[in-house]
Image: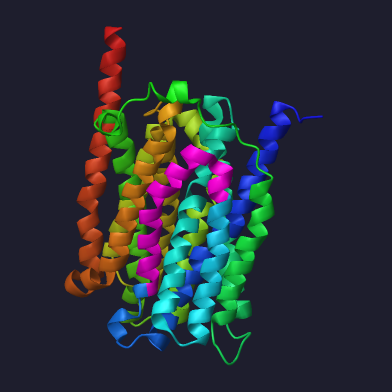
């Protein structure tokens, strides 16, 4: 006997939350240990952060082929392949450590990018799992709760396993990364998402360049790019800035931990805020909080300034990114969803990859204050776009 639509919806969302919790634990492992392993294996100190940057680049470059596979074979098949590559990436990275082979380790972190692209797509799978459009924002928010669990699992795995193999420090953590991806496989296999639109319907889809030129896509994609890009840039630069200002490595790590918790904890109620206030309002609120984090950072260099700015940045990212994802759903028809979602994520995570490569150099050039001052005009630009779109829609409504 097949489950009722409501029961199937709850089941799929529960599976996606669990898969997000396991898959989302991989980036904290790679980001927290990639630089340390790089220092241990790289021939020059300048290359020590290359494994982390290659993970971000691999994620950005994988968004388009992952979306193509989802369109051709369905989300479940793509997600299963992503988890298999997640297992392989952890094994390759651990093998690189055991062989003291820096390039092999980098290959492992790069392969993890495809798994990361699939995990980031789980929020879009939540839209497929829920038939009622009015509940889409709530579904996205619910799946993002898995990120909060992942933010706890990932660092704890590092703490428990980094010295588990004394002859090869940190290799145990990457074996554990592979094990987490392996645990996700049966969850993804149990997914029962609606099939892709039939080919006859897909033939009526608009060309991607035409969709990308619409005001709705421009505003949604720009809000997502700025929300995620600024968060990634500032999160990467903050620990270096804190240590440079005389704070300890432990204090910097604690600040990042609070930041990550602030990123995902609001997901318990972000969907309800969007349902009550609207997508644009919550997206704008997130951007205002990101700007507030920059302003707080400019007021001083004490520990409270850094930690407070990181917490505001995390909450602002949550509202801004989930709101932008909800805005994106207004940009496409069902037959267009895969390619539009892929283009959006390519822009977002391409920006994150660039930020990962450039944050250290820019921090050295203009300093922590310069970075925070420089991001304020970008936030202002997106707020102006959101205001323009709101005014434009009100004018269109008044003419109807």
Residue 69 is covered by the magenta coloring: yes
Is residue 61 or residue 45 the one in the foreground?
61
Which quadrant holds residue 329?
Answer: top left
Q: Position of residue 168 (x, y in %)?
A: 55, 88
The majority secondary structure of the magenta stretch comes to helix
Residue at figure coordinates x 38%, y 39% from the top left: 283
Q: Position of residue 278 (x, y in %)?
A: 43, 30
Tally of marks: 0
Residue at figure coordinates x 21%, y 59% from the top left: 373
Residue at figure coordinates x 27%, y 39% from the top left: 383
Q: Which residues are magenta?
A: 51-79
Which quadrant holds residue 185?
Answer: bottom right
Instruction: Work out whether 213 lies above or below 83.
Output: above
Is residue 315 or residue 224 the one in the foreground?
224
Placement of the N terminus among the 4 image quadrants = top right
Residue at figure coordinates x 66%, y 48% from the top left: 189
> Does residue 26 appear left or right of residue 213 in this picture?
right
Placement of the C terminus among the 4 image quadrants = top left
Instruction: Work out whether 307 lies above or below 12.
Output: below
Q: Position of residue 99 (x, y in %)?
A: 49, 87
Please identify the residue farthest to the bottom as the structure is shown: 167
Q: Position of residue 167 (x, y in %)?
A: 58, 92
Residue 50 at least partly seen: yes
Is residue 239 or residue 16 the one in the foreground?
16
Is residue 245 or residue 354 the one in the foreground?
354
């Amino acid at each position: 006997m097949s489950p009722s639509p409501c029961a199937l919806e709850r089941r799929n969302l529960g599976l996606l939350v669990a898969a997000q919790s396991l898959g989302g634990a991989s980036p904290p492992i790679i980001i927290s240990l990639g630089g340390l392993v790089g220092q241990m294996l790289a021939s020059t100190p300048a290359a020590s952060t290359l494994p982390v940057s290659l993970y971000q680049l691999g994620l950005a470059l994988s968004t388009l082929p992952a979306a193509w596979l989802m369109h051709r074979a369905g989300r479940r098949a793509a997600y299963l392949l992503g988890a298999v590559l997640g297992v392989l990436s952890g094994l390759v990275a651990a093998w690189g450590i055991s062989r003291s082979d820096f390039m092999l380790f980098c290959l492992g972190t790069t392969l993890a990018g495809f798994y990361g692209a699939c995990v980031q797509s789980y929020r879009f799978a939540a839209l497929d799992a829920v038939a009622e459009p009015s509940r889409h924002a709530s579904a996205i928010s619910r799946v993002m709760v898995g990120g909060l669990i992942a933010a706890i699992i990932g660092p704890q795995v590092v703490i428990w396993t980094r010295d588990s193999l004394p002859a090869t420090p940190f290799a145990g953590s990457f074996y554990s990364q592979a094990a987490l991806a392996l645990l996700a496989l049966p969850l993804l296999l149990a997914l029962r998402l609606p099939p892709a639109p039939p080919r006859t319907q897909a033939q009526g889809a608009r060309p991607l360049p035409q969709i990308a030129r619409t005001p709705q896509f421009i505003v949604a994609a720009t809000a997502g790019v700025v929300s995620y890009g600024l968060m990634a840039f500032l999160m990467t630069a903050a620990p270096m800035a804190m240590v440079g200002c005389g704070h300890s490595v432990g204090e910097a790590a604690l600040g990042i931990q609070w930041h990550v918790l602030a990123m995902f904890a609001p997901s318990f109620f972000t969907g309800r805020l969007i349902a009550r206030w609207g997508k644009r309002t919550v997206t704008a609120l997130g951007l205002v909080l990101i700007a507030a984090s920059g302003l707080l950072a400019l007021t001083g260099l004490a520990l409270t300034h850094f930690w407070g700015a990181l917490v505001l940045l995390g909450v602002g990212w949550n509202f801004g990114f989930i709101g932008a994802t909800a805005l994106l759903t207004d940009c496409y028809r069902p037959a267009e969803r895969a390619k539009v979602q892929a283009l959006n994520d390519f822009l977002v995570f391409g920006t994150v990859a660039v930020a990962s490569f450039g944050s250290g150099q820019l921090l050295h050039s203009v300093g922590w204050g310069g970075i925070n001052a420089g991001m304020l005009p970008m936030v202002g630009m997106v707020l102006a776009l959101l205001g323009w779109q709101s005014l434009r829609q009100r004018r269109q409504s008044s003419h109807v």
